[in-house]
Amino acid sequence: MKSLIISACLLTLINACGDKSPRAEQKDKDTKGMRYLALGDSYTIGESVEERDRWPVLFADAMNKREKPVKNPEIIARTGWTTRDLLLALTNFNPAEKYDIVSLLIGVNNQYQGRSLEEYRGEFRELLLKSIAYAGDEPGRVIVLSTPDWGVTPFGIENRQEIGKEIDQFNDIAEEECNKANVLFIDITPISRSALNDPTLIARDNLHFSGKMHQLWVDEIFRNTRFKL
């Protein structure tokens, strides 16, 4: 009888040390790895794509596959946000711990709403400084992506040339400010323009970009020789 009890206890111990349940695995994923904060607008929140196809989620997955563990991204972004909207959303955001990675992609709604370039420069610079602060005052842990060109979508095609020109102007400012702050700037705008001849890169709403496009943006990050995280 005593031996049976010992055997049962051993079996329980072995099972407890074996494969973890999906819930336990998810808990490990949530508590281990680098902390990642993604700031932005509709492109960061992944308007009209599945959650798993948002580029910040794809980026975290890619890092994990490269044996650089990253937690599920914390996303502060909303469709329609301008630089001012994002700044307002961050007014009382004072995280107790620094983030290991912070990404920023913002500007399309400034362009869409006809906001001035001067206003964008000032507000973008402020967002950039906040991003660096969230990353523990380490510019090397901040990534900025350029604004995609929605002029190639069915929704913007009639004004494609004008939209593209204005998007370039906003992106020029973002790149200039990133260079001043020694922050990595990833130019994904040329990639977004490839959707002009590939409808699979357009989301179902005919305005945003598909998960396939989001993956191309992530691929571009890892192709950049300055990316050292």
Image (cartoon, rainbow, N blue to C red):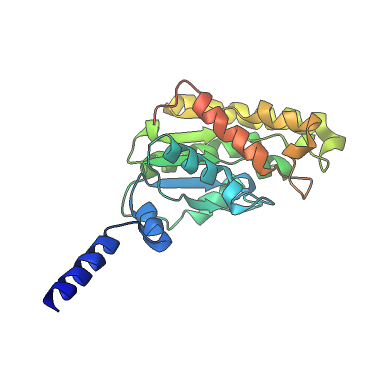
- Viewed as shown, does residue 214 lie left or right of 20? right
Nearest the viewer among 18 and 132 is: 18
Which corner quadrant of the image does residue 142 belong to? Answer: top left
Q: Which residue is drawn at 42% across and 45% down?
A: 36
Is residue 94 something that shows in the picture?
A: no
The residue at the point 84 percent across, 36 percent down is: 157
The x, y position of residue 165, in whole percent, is 74, 28
Residue 184 drawn at (x, y percent): 47, 28
Numbered marks: total: 0
Residue 43 shown left or right of residue 35 in the figure? right
> Toward the viewer: 146 or 162?
146
Q: In this view, does 163 lie to the left or right of 133?
A: right
The image quadrant where one finds the C terminus is: top left
Considering depth in this image, is 29 or 82 the residue closer to the camera?
29
Q: Is residue 180 above or below residue 129?
A: above
Q: Which residue lies furthest to the bottom in this view?
A: 1
User: Percent position (x, y) of residue 19?
Assistant: 35, 56
Up the image or down, 125 lies above or below 95; here it is: above
Report whether residue 150 is seen: yes
**Farthest right residue in view:** 158
Q: Position of residue 76 (x, y in %)?
A: 51, 52
User: Along the line of sight, which residue is nearer the eye, 202 or 111?
Assistant: 202
61 shown above or below 224:
below
